[in-house]
Amino acid sequence: MGAALEFIADYFKNVIQGTSPLVRSYRYIRLTQTNRHAFWDNVVAAYYTMEGKGANGIRGADFYKLLQMLCSDFPVEIISAVLAILEKKPEQLVPFDEFAAGINACLLYEEFFEHAEVVFHSLDTAGDGNIHKERFFDALSLTVIENERTRKDPGMPTPAEFQAWVANVDCVQDQ
């Protein structure tokens, strides 16, 4: 019952004080699980909340801010890669299909990082945060291959994508 009261209190606080379109859009995306039908309805709502009246898209700068909020704990290289793929200047408008693709990419990376964290912790038997890089990548590769076979998690990269990523990783130190 406490969570329900907190939600209602937060709702009325936001109604009275108001929030920015950026924060409202972030909440639309974060407050629904990605496997729910309502999630894509919320992505549409997030887009139109940021778009404003009479516009034909959202400003690239605003979209970048939203992606940075969604990916705040990602490695800098990942968010930079997502932004580079979009090739939008801050003043350019981002249409809905690019908006949805960027949001989807960030959330898929997030799911993959969650899987990687589970694998890391399962290998860190000493609990000291140190594991062998090759052992980690081998275990993660097995997870990726199993997912390819079952297609259980669309957030997981294909084995080829994973191998390309591993070949370019230089931020993990060998133990």
Image (cartoon, rainbow, N blue to C red):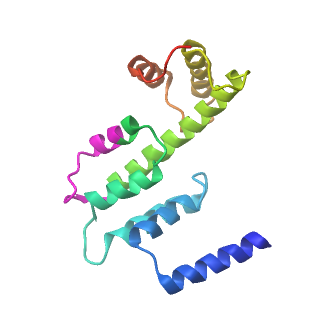
Q: Is residue 23 left or right of residue 60?
A: right
Camera sees residue 96 = no
Q: Is residue 151 left or right of residue 168?
A: right
- Up the image or down, 136 lies above or below 106; here it is above
Q: Residue at x 27, y 58 (%)?
A: 61
The image quarter containing residue 59 is: bottom left
The image quarter containing residue 128 is: top right
Q: Nearer the viewer, residue 106 or 130?
A: 130
Q: Nearer the viewer, residue 147 or 170?
A: 170
- Up the image or down, 20 lies above or below 149; here it is below
The image quarter containing residue 64 is: bottom left
Q: Nearer the viewer, residue 42 or 132?
A: 132
Q: Position of residue 71 (x, y in %)?
A: 45, 48
Camera sees residue 29 = yes
- Up the image or down, 103 lies above or below 126; here it is below
**Magenta stretch encompasses residue 92:** yes
If the image is split into quadrants, where does the N terminus sit? Answer: bottom right
Q: Residue at x 51, y 65 (%)?
A: 28
Q: Position of residue 138 (x, y in %)?
A: 58, 15
Question: Residues in magenta?
Answer: 80-96
Q: Residue at x 36, y 57 (%)?
A: 65
Q: Residue at x 49, y 30 (%)?
A: 157
Question: Residue placed farthest to the bottom in the image?
Answer: 16
If the image is split into quadrants, where does the C terminus sit? Answer: top right
